[in-house]
Amino acid sequence: DAGVIQSPRHEVTEMGQEVTLRCKPISGHNSLFWYRQTMMRGLELLIYFNNNVPIDDSGMPEDRFSAKMPNASFSTLKIQPSEPRDSAVYFCASSPYPGPLQETQYFGPGTRLLVL
Amino acid sequence: SQQGEEDPQALSIQEGENATMNCSYKTSINNLQWYRQNSGRGLVHLILIRSNEREKHSGRLRVTLDTSKKSSSLLITASRAADTASYFCATDTPNAGKSTFGDGTTLTVKP
C-alpha cells in the first residue's frame, strides 16, 4: 500500500487566496484525521471523520477552515481566505478503526503551507 | 491544555546510550501510544499500550504505563544516530473518540 497520500507537498500562497489541501487515506481505513503542526502550538487535531462523516470539528480554528470527505478515498481541507498565521504543516492521518476507540493512526507526509 | 505532556522537552545523548522519555496525562485513558517524527516527515506509530497493561516491548523500545501516576515512559536502548527524532505520546480517553498528542520530546543521538 502506498500509505496516506497528501498533495501538494508544499504550497506558497498570498494572503487572501484560497488554499485546498488533499488527502487520500489508506484503502479500507474508516477514520480520517486532519492535523496542523506549528512550533508554537504543536500538533493540533482540526477535524476527524468516521466512515466519511465529520464527527468532531471542534479543532477547526475559524469559519475560514472547512473540510469535506465526499467518499472513502478522498478528503479536502480548505482555507478561504488564507492568512499568514495559517502557515503550518498540515497532516492527514487515517486509521482502520471506526467508532470512539481510536488506535493506530497512519500519517501522511504533510503539506507545508506558507501564506505570505 | 494538553492531555499528554512529554518530559524532557529535549534530550541529547551519545550513540549507544539509553534514552528515556516520559509522558504524563490528566484523565483516565483507554490506551496510550508513542509516535516518532523525523524532521520534515509525518508521524510514525511505534507502540500502543492499553490501560490494563504495565509494560510492553518492541525491539529496542520498552514502554511502561503507570495508571496510578498517570504516566508512561519510553525507553530506547542502545541508541543510534538514526533514532534522532521527536517522540510524541498520544492518549485515547474513554468516549473522546480521538487521540490527544503531547508537545513531544526532541531526541538527538550524537554519533
Image: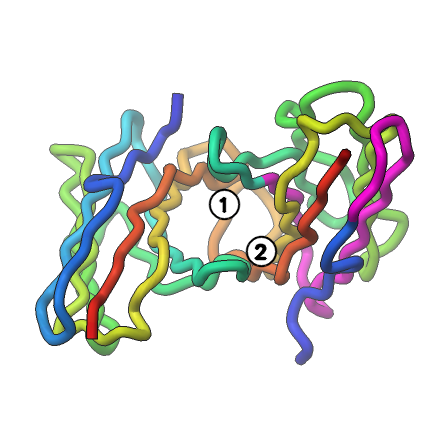
* Coordinates of residue B41 in the picture (x, y in percent): 53, 61
User: Where residue B15 appears, x then y in whole percent?
Assistant: 15, 73
Of residue B111 and residue B86, the one placed in the foreground of this image is: B111
Which of the chains bears the disc numbered 1?
A
**Dot 2: chain letter:** A
The residue tagged 2 is A97
Q: Are marks 2 and 1 in contact (CB under 8 Å)?
A: yes
In 3D space, how far apart are the residues under numbered discs 2 and 1 (Cα atoms)?
A: 7 Å
Magenta-colored span? A12-36
Q: Quadrant of the C terminus of chain A?
A: top right
Residue density around tag 2, few if under 14, some if 14–19, many if 20 or more, within 10 Å: some
Residue at the spot x=82%, y=33% of the render?
A79
Which residue is the site of mark 1? Answer: A101
A24 in the magenta segment: yes
Residue in view at x 20 percent, y 51 percent: B11
Report if residue B51 lies within the magenta region. Answer: no
Q: Amino acid at mark 1?
A: Leu
**Residue A111 picture location, percent across and down:** 69, 53
